[in-house]
Image (cartoon, grey):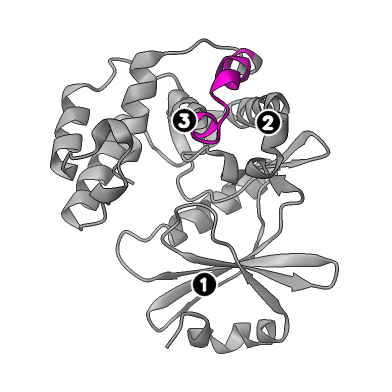
Amino acid sequence: MSVRERLPLSLKPLDSHEWLPVAIGRSRAAVWRIGIGKTALYLKAEPNHELAEMPRELLRLDYLAGMGFPAPRVVDHVQADDFSWLLMTEVKGQDLTRTLERRVDVARMLAEGLRRLHALDPVNCPFDHALDQRLADAERNLAAGLVDESDFDDDRQGWTGQAVFDWLVANRPAEEERVVTHGDACLPNVMSVDGRFSGVVDCGRLGVADRWQDLALACRSLQSNGGTEVVGEFLSAYGTEFDAERYTYYCTLDEMF
């Protein structure tokens, strides 16, 4: 039985609309864009398990709604059989991979979005993603077999998940500059309309962490999408300089998730 065939009864009315699978990104969940008239909803389905991200994403979307920050709004959340289902509103615009021909603009919009997110007061954010917590989460993922060693970046090809974890423990930065971070600040998760930042999606890893949690993955995403020459413009627009130590550390930490 396919994931869609498991659709719970309360969501069956969606079956009469057009479903478009969303393949971009590396989420473990299945995601569809469901066209409804001139607008759309997004439906995410994920198998229920102890370390599933969907329950965390639901809480984080509620938090962002309370902050008035542009992100999907929760329409419905259903747990049925072995799956959880999250129905969300659409964030208007296109993700930043769709505008790569204007790389300088992409760098500027990425910086704009992260500046706005990082300006939220971390005191009001209940999600602790400081390194003590994230390393504990990484160890749980490793023990549960959720670390995909075949998908490691080139610098860590051939490493085991345990070797990555041991390196993280041995090389953690001495300090953290804590802000509200997205947690997976790559180009597909940042949206724009008419050359302006319009919101973020895929928010299950949002939490208070060092700002380089986001800046490292944003720089890596720019580089992997052919924008190496605009990494400097991105960091300048954000208001900081490249930190090689933190860049390497947080890209390595991402291997565990």
Alpha-carbon neighbours of circle 2 within 10 Å: few (<14), some, or many (≥20)? many
Query: Is label 2 in a helix, a strand or a loop?
Result: helix
Q: Is 249 placed above or below 198 here?
A: above
Circle 2 residue: 106
- Residue drawn at x 73%, y 27% is 105
Amino acid residing under circle 3: Arg
**Which numbered tag is attached to residue 85?**
1
> Is residue 234 found inside the magenta-colored segment of the image?
yes
Distance Cα–Cα, label 3 vs label 2: 14 Å
Residue 237: % across, % down:
66, 16
| Percent x, y of residue 205 | 45, 45
What's the magenta region? 221-236
Q: Nearer the viewer, mark 3 or mark 1?
A: 3
Q: Mainly helix, strand or loop, the magenta region?
A: helix
N-terminal of the pair, mark 1 or mark 2, is 1
* 138 left or right of 77 in image: left
Residue 191 in the image: x percent, y percent? 68, 43
Residue name at image x 37 percent, y 79 percent: 82
* Image quadrant where residue 158 sits: top left
